Image (tube, helix red, strand yellow):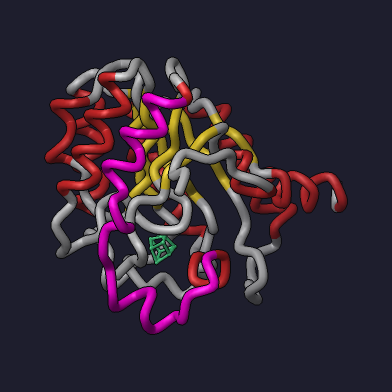
Amino acid sequence: MKPIYEPKGKAKEYGDLAINIYTGCPHSCFYCFAPRTIKRNKEQFHNIVEPRKNIVDEVRKQLDQEQITDKLIHLCFTCDPYPTGYDTTPTREIIKLLKDSGNHVQILTKGSGLRDFDLLDENDWYGVTLDGTAGKWCQPVEYRIADLMQAHKCGIKTWVSFEPVVNAGNVFAYLRRIASFIDKVKIGKLNYYPSVIDWAEFGRIIEKECQTLHVDYYIKDSLREEMEKNA
Ligand code: SF4
């Protein structure tokens, strides 16, 4: 197994290299595509969450063999690096390995990575997803925002993934709340599910709002296409 890999397709917009640490995720977002991506039964994916077999040793081995250094490595695409209610020591051990080998991490979670802020510095990114819903099994939104503020205070770069946008009104409200302590936001549409959102209009307004609030932003390709199609 080579756990450090190059993402393909839409995931490529998030990072050049990535690691998936766990076999599943308890957060149970309705739009989750991870079970399909890794060909796992949905029920099992959300209910049986374990570190992938020998994941820490395999990361160590690959870093040694391939001399991977000075890369920004995304955690995680097909799971959450901080599955709420589970022991996240493997995530901590992997961050230590990556940092010790001269790499940097880009975390994206709906849990809490607070316990590992002592390992991170100004070259790392701590991010949370704020899709506009509360997410029953995720870390509550208020806690996720508090973690972002704390990361910012610790000198860690902060980012928010507004993807997929589920409730546009909430996303605008979150954007205004976080604007003063965030380094970047990434915004993407809900794909494969019906939505009442007019994506072209939403994209244009949120882009303008980011500019007004002086927030660095990236609009994901599928949302940008809608904006250009209906310009
Ligand atoms: S947090 Fe990510 S991996 Fe977990 S259920 Fe939600 S979309 Fe899937």
Left or right of 188, for residue 87: left
Q: Residue at x 72, y 44 (%)?
A: 221
Query: Is residue 123 or residue 144 the one in the foreground?
Result: 123
Residue 121: image quadrant is top left
Left or right of 38, for residue 136: left
Horizontal and vertical percent position of residue 50? 26, 64
Q: Residue at x 24, y 44 (%)?
A: 91
Query: Is residue 35 or residue 131 the one in the foreground?
Result: 35
Residue 26: image quadrant is bottom left
Query: Is residue 184 or residue 79 the one in the foreground?
Result: 79
**Would you place residue 154 above or below residue 85 in this image?**
above
Horizontal and vertical percent position of residue 8? 65, 46
Q: Is residue 195 magenta?
A: no
Q: Residue at x 40, y 52 (%)?
A: 130
Q: How many numbered discs, if any?
A: 0
Horizontal and vertical percent position of residue 42? 45, 80
Horizontal and vertical percent position of residue 116? 17, 35
Magenta range: 38-65
**Would you place residue 85 above or below residue 176 in this image?**
below
Q: Residue at x 19, y 39 (%)?
A: 92
Main SS of the magenta part reads helix
